[in-house]
Every structure is written in structure tokens, then in C-alpha cells.
Image (cartoon, grey):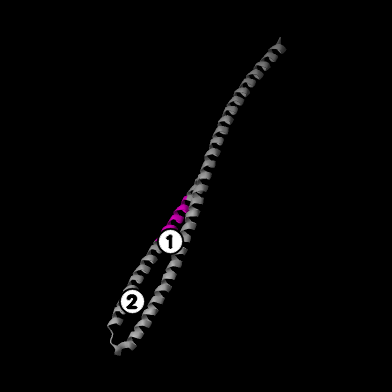
Amino acid sequence: MSKTVEGFKNKLSQAEESMKEAERKMFLSNSEFEKEKALLKQKADYYEKSLEELSPKEKDLSSQVKNSQKEHLSNLKENSQKYENLTKSLQATIDQLQERLSELETDMIIKTQKYDTDKKRWDEKELILSKRLEEDQNLISTLKEELSDNSENQARNIHE
């Protein structure tokens, strides 16, 4: 039974480690996303300001900058969606691991209670059997004495 409890403890520990790893990955992903988002926003602001300062001769370059800005915004949206999906996936994994952890804890409690109940019953039965054995041994001793006394009495009756 203790092996089972140890097994459940090991599974519980592994589930907790997996959950911590998933949380760490989710935190790192969010951190990278926020950093990239801030950088892209800063770039977008810079390009917008630069556009306002351009002279008419630089309109062609302005158009290229706008295209680049659109591309960056598109990348930002794409990355945002990607990190959002990753976050949802990691959260789902965490939720599954927490549910499994709860199931394992409940199972361990039930099995521990059953073990305790079975052990108590076993101890009670062992005590009853020990008492019966002692009673039976006393009865055997008494019967042997009676048999011995009867044999002696028969032997005396035969000699008389």
C-alpha cells in the first residue's frame, strides 16, 4: 500500500512540475509578446512622426514607410494571435494538470482510508484469532489432563 501511496506522491510531484513548467512558458511567452508589441508600437510612432516631416520629394519614400508600417502592424496582429493561442493552450494544459492532480489527491485519500480500515479490521481479526488460539490451547491442555486422569483411573480399576 505504501508503494501505491509513494507512486501517487511521485505522480503528484510530476504533475506539479509539469504545471510549473507550463506556467513558466506562458509567462515567458507573454513577456516576449509584450516586449515585441512595445517595440513595434515605438517603431510605428517613429514612422508616423517621420512621415509628417517629409518633404514632397520624399513622398515615394513615405509610401514605402507606410507599407513597412502596415507590414509591421500585420506582423504584430499575427504574433498577437499566435501568443494568444499559445496562452490558451498552456492554460488548458494547466487546467488539465490541476484536474488530474485533484483526482490523484482524492484517489490517494480514498486508498489511504481503505488501507487504514483494512488494517484495523486485520488487527481486530488477528486479536480474535489469538484469543481463540489461546482458548483452544487451554482446552487441549484441560482435555489432556482429563484424559490422563481417566487413563490412570482405568488403570487403577483394572488392578483392583
State the residue at coordinates (58%, 33%).
125
Label disc, if present, on residue 44 of the rendered structure:
2
* In the image, residue 13 lies in the stretch drawn in magenta: yes
Percent x, y of residue 49? 29, 78
Where does the magenta region start and end? 9-23
Percent x, y of residue 24? 39, 61
* In the image, residue 109 lies in the stretch drawn in magenta: no
State the residue at coordinates (58%, 30%).
128
Front-most of residues 134 and 23: 23
**Residue 7 visible in the snapshot:** no
Percent x, y of residue 71? 39, 79
> In the displayed structure, would residue 41 be above or below residue 140?
below
Task: Specify which label sits upstream in the sequence, 2 or 1.
Answer: 1
Q: Residues within 10 Å of mark 1 (few under 14, many from 20)?
A: many
> In the displayed structure, would residue 94 be above or below residue 134?
below
Per the picture, the main secondary structure of the magenta-coloured stretch is helix
Percent x, y of residue 58? 30, 88
Front-most of residues 80 and 117: 80
Query: Is 155 on the left or on the right of 100, as rendered?
Result: right
- Name the residue carrying label 1: 22
**Residue 131 visible in the snapshot:** yes
Amino acid type assigned to the residue bearing label 1 in the image: Ala
Give the alpha-carbon distance from disc 2 to disc 1, as whole Å: 32 Å
Amino acid type assigned to the residue bearing label 2 in the image: Ala
State the residue at coordinates (71%, 11%).
157
Front-most of residues 35 and 14: 35
> In the displayed structure, would residue 118 be above or below residue 83?
above
